[in-house]
Amino acid sequence: MNRRRAVGALIGLSGGTFLYTTAEALPIGLLLPMAADLAVSPSQVGMLVTAYGAVVVVASIPLTALARRIPRRRLLSALLAGFVVSTATTVFASTFALLLVARMATAATHALFWAVVVPAAAELFRPGLRGRVVAIVFAGGSVALVLGVPAGTWLGERAGWRVSFLAVAGLGAIVLVAVASLLPSTPPNQGHAARGATPDVYRFWLLVAVAILTTAGAIAAYTYVALFVTEVSGFPDSSVGAILLARGVASVLGILAVGAVVDRSPWLALVATVALQTVALLGLYAIGHRPTAAVGLLALAGLAFAAFTAVLGGVVLQVAPGRSDLAAATVSAAVNVGITGGALVAGLALPSYGVHSTVLLGALLGVVALLIVAGGFNLRPTRRGQRLEVQEAYQTTGRQGARR
């Protein structure tokens, strides 16, 4: 494939992750305008985000199994077309019920897109560049948090929330054209990224556990970050936006940095990013009352978690025990379980132990993840039959999803 065309297709796929992340998080920034316009409570608007994540968790594996025979270009183009239509429906929704249905439709395309985009992007370049390529794809999601969501919130506050979603739908149409015209029509069961480079059922499920714990730790600390920097670090409310921007910029830098090393030592990069996030959160718990230290540690935690998500994509392509898209769907679902679980446990801890406890909780979850990685490799099953039984169970899950 022409290298220039491959780069263009990669940019288009990264644009897709940018759009999906922006669309998922935009109701958070536009909570009050949407509630006022639809005559519902802010908590009901919050359900748009919760329901979105729930659909991603439930639908990722079954939809990936159902779409296992569809060529990449056709599938990704159809998903982006679905994204444009469902987002446009959001713009013109006159009732909250219709808006919720449109959001759930967007979430369904999101679930399958994130499963397929990783192997599709990796196929564009030689195997030695897998980690770097996946990091570029994931960078789109981080840029969305730095640029897409703030820009969409700013536009929605001035022109109305529907205009923000209309802009997202318009960008989606552009990305759709780019992907449909540049991405090769690769059969889903062919190419070096169709299956794991070194399949390993045990390490794969270990990776799933680490994904849940590390994500839960990051979200437990991040959910109430505005409260932390004002109550613990002593910043005024007006400084929260700038602090979150610094964290977002650090996240992008983290993905770019890990992209340069993940292909050489993917498992070392995984351990390093989990450890770095854990250290940053422990630091916040210990010295988060110092304003300068708090900003630096929050940025470090953002850098570590963004790098971790990029490493996940590369490691999945290495250890996937069967089809890489089904493995990516499983890890995507695990990340969304971590997001939901992290927000839940932090919310439960907050009333009794205060916001200071949320960063400690996040750090402790990171410690557990590190212990799993450290102990897991020393306790690998030695009997080949044990590994095959787990692999057969994994593949049976995929077949059952396909029948559904």
Image (tube, rainbow, N blue to C red):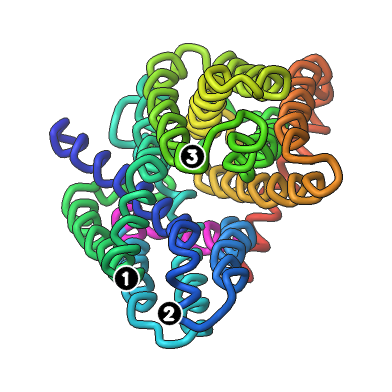
Q: Is residue 63 magenta?
A: yes
Are discs 2 and 1 less than 8 Å apart at CB? yes
> Tag 1's secondary structure?
loop
Q: Main secondary structure of the magenta part?
A: helix
- Seen in the image, is 196 located left or right of residue 43? left
**Which one is earlier in the sequence, the residue at label 2 or at label 3?**
2
Q: Nearer the viewer, mark 1 or mark 3?
A: 3
**Which one is earlier in the sequence, the residue at label 1 or at label 3?**
1
**Which one is earlier in the sequence, the residue at label 2 or at label 1?**
2
Cα distance in 3D space between marks 1 and 3:
23 Å
Total number of numbered discs in the rendering: 3
Q: Nearer the viewer, mark 2 or mark 3?
A: 3
> Tag 2's secondary structure?
helix
What residue is at 60 percent from the left and 73 percent from the top?
44
Out of 218 and 132, give the one closest to the viewer.
Answer: 218
* Above or below, 48 relative to 29: below
Provide the residue designation for mark 2.
37
- The C terminus lies in quadrant: bottom right
Q: Which three-letter amino acid code belongs to the residue tagged 3? A: Val
Provide the residue designation for mark 1.
160
Q: Quadrant of residue 283?
A: top right
The residue stretch that appears in magenta: 62-76
Provide the residue designation for mark 3.
240
- Seen in the image, is 7 located left or right of residue 319? left
